[in-house]
Amino acid sequence: MLNQKQAVLLERPAKTNDVLPSAPVKIQDTDTKTVGQVTVDKPIMTTRNVDVYYDDKQAIRNVSIDIAYNEVLSMIGPSGCGKSTFLRCLNRMNDTIESARVTGSIELEGHDIYDKKTDVVTLRARVGMVFQKPNPFPKSVYENVAYGPRIHGLARNQSELDEIVETSLRRAGLWDEVKDRLREPGTGLSGGQQQRLCIARCIAVNPDVILMDEPCSALDPIATARIEELIDELRQNYSIVIVTHSMQQAARVSQRTAYFHLGDLIEVGETSIIFTNPQHKLTEDYLTGRFG
Ligand SMILES: Nc1ncnc2c1ncn2[C@@H]1O[C@H](COP(=O)(O)OP(=O)(O)O)[C@@H](O)[C@H]1O
Ligand SMILES: [Mg+2]
């Protein structure tokens, strides 16, 4: 949690002379080596020396970072710095982009997710993804959630499937709003409800990690607040990596923050510290509105 002074700092509009407290000498903008602690004691995922190219254009340069159990890690940085590209590495969504090439090592509980033996469909169930624009299937609310468990064989009979659907919708904070309209189309729900439906769909196949790429940017402030509360609850059971362009959102929902700049991971640290006392000049410039 942020203390009052930190919270005030975040609320204040950025000014170019808004120097953060006790600004020591910052690491200069020409240095692109990651500052801060990239490792955690018990990681669920580790990434080491990850490079991503689209054809011969490099979009991610030598990124290493761990993801802990039961944490929310936020990834911030100016548009085009590679946040979505890096997020997509974590469940091999970049496989679907023909020009993309990923090198380095990415492990989920010690297993190389890029190993030839890795089943990508299973991987994407364990490392689920929620996108910017809610994208329910053109099917009923029930079917949106039941589809994954069915294809992964997670239910032995109809009542087990019903139970998975209900539990997933409850965990996504949507059950009470949809329990009487399970047979209606998922696309008929409000934007915020659709996004929670997508989260329920993701939860239904027992993920370990949930990736969220700007999950609130198509939502109004009330729906956004609802999703942010939900993210905090979900942390009890899952690890969450969230890309957000809202620094306030990163400050509200995450325990650790990673700042990206032009394909480099510049700084990683506890969210409250990154926002109040960044070590790197590039991070400070971004947070104070001088860049991006
Ligand atoms: N499918 C793609 N093909 C080619 N270049 C891409 C593709 N997706 C992203 N890029 C490029 O990679 C860089 C990082 O993009 P992206 O990961 O979308 O950044 P962010 O999510 O931080 O805005 C940008 O220069 C972008 O133009
Ligand atoms: Mg993006």
Image: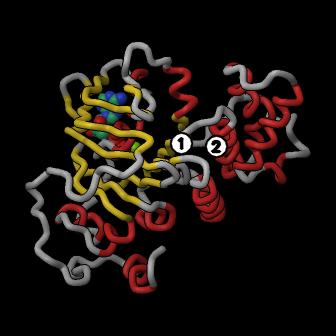
- Coloring scheme used: secondary structure
Q: Which residue is the site of mark 2?
A: 199
Residue drawn 89% across and 30% down? 159
Query: Label 2: few (<14), some or many (≥20) within 10 Å?
Result: many
The answer to whether 16 appears left or right of 84 in the picture is left
Q: Which residue is the site of mark 1?
A: 210
The residues bearing labels 1 and 2 have C-alpha atoms spaced at a distance of 9 Å
Residue drawn 78% across and 25% down? 155
Q: Do the residues labelled 1 and 2 touch (CB within 8 Å)?
A: yes
**Circle 1 or circle 2, nearest the eye:** 1
Residue drawn 31% across and 24% down? 100
Quadrant of the drawing holding the C terminus: bottom left
Label 2: element kind: helix
Q: Nearer the viewer, residue 8 or 36?
A: 36
The answer to whether 26 appears left or right of 54 in the picture is left
Residue 219 appears in the picture as rendered: no
Judged from the image, the quadrant occupied by ligand 1 is top left
**Residue 152 appears at what percent x and percent y?**
67, 21
Tell me the quarter of the picture where residue 125 sits: top right
Above or below: residue 222 compared with residue 201:
below
Q: Which amino acid does label 2 sit on?
A: Ile
Query: Label 1: few (<14), some or many (≥20) within 10 Å?
Result: many
Residue 33 appears in the picture as rendered: yes
The answer to whether 165 appears left or right of 262 in the picture is right
Above or below: residue 249 compared with residue 83:
below
What's the mark number on residue 34?
Answer: none
Q: Nearer the viewer, residue 28 or 240?
A: 240
**Residue 25 appears at what percent x and percent y?**
11, 74
Q: What residue type is labelled 1?
A: Ile
